[in-house]
Amino acid sequence: MTLKRSVLFVINPIAGGKEKRHLHRIIKRELDHSRFHYEFAYTESADHARRLSKSASYLGFDVVAAVGGDGTVNEVARGILELGKEQAAMAIIPFGSGNGLARHLRIPMRPAAAVRLINRLKTTRMDAGLMNGFPFFCVAGAGFDAHISQLFAKNKKRGFSGYIKSALREIRLYQPARYEVKSGGKVIREKAFLVSIANASQYGNNAYIAPGASTSDGLLDVCILQPFPFYRYPEMALRLMTRRIQSSRYMRTVRGKEITVLREAEGPVHLDGEPQHMGNQLDIRVMPSSIAVIVP
């Protein structure tokens, strides 16, 4: 008799502002019960998903499925990562506002199709990044995107529309800052609208900040977007959505394993869209092949 694999679905009930009551029916219908048994756990606060996934990995669950957006994925992946190499695999059931990592990995946006991927149990090992000791798996950064993440976190209304409204409201008011970026012997000093550190190619919603980024190349893409005139905002938005931001005269990109970013003052950063407050020096490095994730 084949021993069944175990799956814990870690569900963020508020992710993306989307209803999840039907999820139990989808899992019951789509998961192969001859091969898997499963349990549910709902998050109740920030960092709860990390604690749940760490416990599940410690208890021997074979798969921990993050049901939510990039913030939920970050917490679940961190919990698994904390137990070292011999850990559970992570699955992603996208329910967030942007679902950047899921989209990069070509995980289906439809929950039923994402659940069916677990049946195949095809995994790949992906890199992670560390910023001042805190892991990220999709994109981290400082500047305008971190500022918007901070505002968005305070907004009770979740979803992509809320993010766009915040960006449109703030873009005229935001003041770019001076940065010094060091990577692989290169030093770049300039004023920037944002500095993004990309492990994956996009923020979410197919907004590609680093179209050439790979989660398995052992490198991070450092994307430095210089200040641009406000009238060019539609153009820059279009470039993000059509994978052409790297060809803009306002964008500079370097790749590296270890990066140091110096800025004028401490302030907000974001890790996979979740805001944090850090000092003026950001020490960033890649952790190659650090976590197993279920992919198509």
Image (tube, helix red, strand yellow):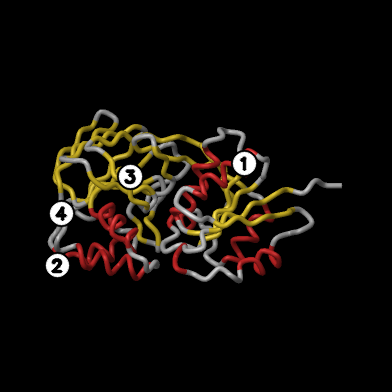
Left-right relation of 40 to 141: right
| Mark drawn on residue 197 | 3
Q: Amino acid at mark 3?
A: Ile
Q: Which residue is mark 2?
A: 231
Question: What residue is drawn where x is 44% and y is 53%?
Answer: 71
Label 4 neighbourhood size at 10 Å, few (<14), some (14-19), many (20+)? some
Q: Earlier in the sequence, mark 4 or mark 3?
A: 3
First in residue order: circle 2 vs circle 1:
1
Separation of marks 2 and 1 at Cα, in angstroms: 50 Å
Rendered image: mark on residue 57 = 1
First of labels 3, 2 by sequence position: 3
Q: Amino acid at mark 1?
A: Ser
Q: Residues within 10 Å of mark 1 (few under 14, many from 20)?
A: many
Report the side of 267 relative to 92 (left or right).
Answer: left
Q: Residue furthest top?
A: 185
Q: Which residue is painted at 35% across and 60% down in the image?
A: 207
Pointer 4: what residue?
227
